[in-house]
Image: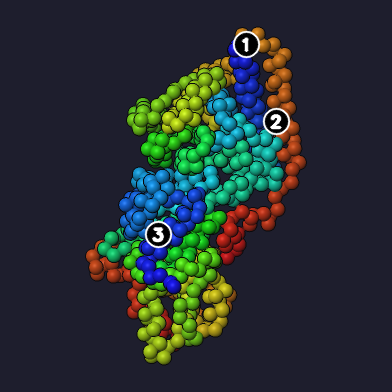
Amino acid sequence: MPLSLSYAQAAALALSESMDLDPRIIALGEDIGRGGVFAQYAGLQSKFGPARIIDTPISEATMIGAGVGMALAGMRPVVEMRVVDFAICAMDEIVNQAAKNRYMFGGQGRVSMLMRLPNGIWNGSAAQHAQSLESWFVHIPGLTVLAPSTASDNYHLFKAALASDDPVVYMEHKELWQQTGLVDIAETSLQVIGEAAVCRKGSDLTIVSWSATIPRLMSLVDELSLSGLSIELIDLRSLWPWDQTTVLESVEKTRRCLVVHEAVQVAGFGAEVAAFVAEHSGLPVARCGAPRIPVGYAPPLEAESVLSLERVRAKIDQLLA
Amino acid sequence: MESASRRGELIELYRMMLRIRAFEDAAEAASQGGVAAWGQKTSAAPARVRGPLHLSTGQEAVAAGVCANLRRTDLITSTHRGHGHTLAKGAHPYRMMAELFGRADGYNHGKGGSMHIADFSVGMLGANGVVAAGMPIAVGAAHAIKLQHGDDRIVACFFGDGAINRGPFLETFNWAKVYQLPVLFVCEDNAYAATTRSSSVTAGEGVCERARGIGIDVESIDGNDVEAVDDAAARLTESIRRGFGPLLLHARTYRFKGHVSVDPGTYREQDEVDQAMCHDPIILAMRKLSAQAVQQAVLDQIKQQADQEMADALARANEAAWPLASDAYLDVQTSGAGQWF
């Protein structure tokens, strides 16, 4: 019987169950003893104690760097960055230390570390708390990059990330924490990292997206289906590795592809997906993201950075014309 | 009896310093023409050791004296100037030299070179190309040891005087003290941050005062006196093993060479260099041993053995096989492993 859980509860449950089974798993971050800023650690410190659910100083570089050292010494740390925007304070540790350790030292060690970098627009929080930076991390060899869009994925992908050999950049979305969904906790086999989910089946056009954009696009696709338009919607879930097979097979069927994301469109991960699809299928491709402006505070300014479904519809019309 | 065993210890420290010196000298010779920096050009014929080579020549007493108080199961992190630490922690010079030469037999199979020299099997968790970047890794490893309970392993974290102006220095000292971690911070203070005199860019009284400000106790010693390093490290590691939390060893030393092997170091006054050369840690130890009636022939033999060992390592590394081009795709990651797109 699947449980109805919020996106935050699903991750907390995945972490709690994993910590029950594996004493090497610990979590560290600011304020997580009080449940974390999004309640994604609710109840965990009272269950596991302050030695395993570790409240840290505001020291992002050392949080990630210490995670590397812990992993090399046999632990499996979960490191909370609060929001992706603060992980910028730890870029040396993520990019030069965590990502490269295994390669640079010739495979002597493994950095099995789950780095939580909540991504995307956080309403009303302006330019330094509302970025979508997934493409930065996909660009770095050594990192796995995950972006769950549902409570179910935030349970199953979380467990898969905890079991991974790799440093994983785990990008929950800042506005999905309260979204609820059914989670099949009886399913104990690990979700495979790198498999996309086909959220809607269709034949006229393929839309590829991820994270908080998915629920918005599902509504749009359902609405358009009433007017007879059949759109296949793919949730990548994992951005590195990403499910090139599912996307290509879909595009071969629908003959058109649109990549949609919340991040700035210029050099966003959509550019990579679009280029790959164009090179491998020769079929028409378009992409739709945000303008290259910082996220503004006032509602009319912020709205310019929020993905516009009007623009998505215009791109769809263009591709179908 | 005590003095005999003391003399035996000093002989071993002397041997380790000579091995480090000989390794550095051999690597330096193999690196000429290997990197374009400080006005030098790369040679037409490719050098055997390519890229930046940061030599610890002159600083051997710190590595030897500290590591003499560590066990194989203890862990260390190092700086960009890490050959001495690696050798003193127990790594094999051939596999180190093979790594400097970029050969498949190297500890990292040629993927890291000098700046990433490491031997995890002896607890040496890596040199680092980024100043102060080993420090968070060290406190994380110490944090893991504390969480794992059950033994009295410790971590030694080597860093330079230049590192104390980077954020991770403050973050890790604070972190280690807050969680009372088993870590010995070792500041190798050679007075230069790359080619800039540290005192000219460092406010306040330096690393010792900064550590005290965080509540970490300090011993500041002549880092070229290997017995002083050994004695201090013995006291500090003993305290850390007993669970009393992090400590700092401040070792004042001097870099005989430039920042990298091709840096002639002309920004230093000749007087300063000449004086430092008179305070060579190896000569100081040799004088002490002579004063303790160790025969010159014995000392000469130790030097000869060290030179021969490193000459052999160099010759073997020179003959070792290169990695395959296809190895460039190995050990990137497990999910979505090394690929073009």
Q: In the rendered image, which quarter is residue B294 located in?
A: top right
Circle number at residue B289: none
Q: Is residue A315 visible?
A: yes
Q: Is residue B165 visible?
A: no
Q: Tell me: residue B140, above or below residue B289.
A: below
Q: Nearer the viewer, residue B337 or A22?
A: A22
Measure the C-alpha gap from mark 1 to mark 3.
62 Å
Mark closer to the observer (2, 1): 1
Residue at which label 3 appears: A12
Q: Position of residue B9 (x, y in %)?
A: 61, 19
Q: Earlier in the sequence, mark 2 or mark 1?
A: 1
Q: Residue at x 54, y 22 (%)?
A: B230
Q: Position of residue A190 (x, y in %)?
A: 53, 64
| Kind of residue sitting beneath label 2 | Met
Q: Position of residue A257 (x, y in %)?
A: 49, 79
Circle number at residue B310: 2
Q: Output the chain of dot 2.
A: B
| Kind of residue sitting beneath label 3 | Ala
Mark closer to the observer (3, 2): 3
Q: Position of residue B224 (x, y in %)?
A: 53, 21
Residue at which label 1 appears: B1
Q: Residue at x 41, y 84 (%)?
A: A317
Is A106 positioned to the left or the right of A308 in the image? right
Q: Output the chain of dot 3.
A: A
